[in-house]
Amino acid sequence: MINKYVALVAISCTALVGCSNTAAQQTNDYRLPLLNQQAERFCSINSRQVRVSDLMLSDGILLQRSNTQIHAARYHRWGGSLEQQLQQSLQRHVTTNDCAGQLRVTVMDFYGDNDGNAVVSGHWEYQYEQQSAIEQSFYYKQELSEDGYDALVEALNSAWLKALTDIKQQLSE
């Protein structure tokens, strides 16, 4: 009976030691590469505004697992507010018309999908003085160059840059 008790204690201790040796998952923070580029101009926040859907207020990078499931990564997070990163990149890259008028961009989707793509979508509205507003939607899907969160952030950055470039071109016409 004592041998069974000793064996049970030994197995329990081994199990506890095994659990305590499980490697802690490292948290990685990411920043859009667009923010690493030097800007020639910088429009004020009053003239260039970004809003994101409530889903994107999470710190975790978003992955769409199915048509109905979205997941915020626990260990792969945005290094600072995603909304602020998108805001700063808009202020740096859409500087047409001497930053005149008000441009509002709403980003509805900014995630990786199960097919290995980055998806960026939303809509924008530009109002200059008393003229009619210009409005347009955007949707970009960028294939990842390889697996992993670094590649996902690069692809999201590329899709967002395409959106900004197209907005800038529309405002220049």
Image: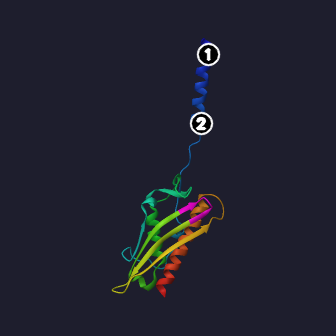
Magenta span: chief secondary structure: strand
Q: Residue 4 — which label?
A: 1
SS for dot 2: loop
Q: Residue at x 54, y 73 (%)?
A: 161
| Quadrant placement of the N terminus | top right
Q: Where is residue 29 in the image (x, y as percent from the top left)?
A: 52, 56
Q: Which residue is drawn at 59% across and 36% down?
A: 21
Q: Distance between the residues labelled 2 and 1?
A: 26 Å
Most extreme residue toward the right is: 146
- Label 2: how many Cα within 10 Å (few below 14, some 14–19, many 20+): few
Q: Where is residue 159 in the image (x, y as percent from the top left)?
A: 56, 70
Q: Which residue is drawn at 61% across and 22% down?
A: 10
Q: State left or right for residue 55 relative to residue 150.
A: left
Q: What residue type is labelled 1?
A: Lys
Name the one closer to the observer, 131 or 6.
131
Q: Which residue is drawn at 56% across and 71% down?
A: 140
Q: Identify the residue under disc 2.
A: 21
* Residue 94, placed above or below residue 26: below
Total numbered labels placed on residues in the image:
2
Q: Which amino acid does label 2 sit on?
A: Asn
Nearest to N terminus: mark 2 or mark 1: 1
Q: Position of residue 116 (x, y in %)?
A: 62, 61
- Label 1: how many Cα within 10 Å (few below 14, some 14–19, many 20+): few
Q: State left or right for residue 83 relative to residue 155.
A: left
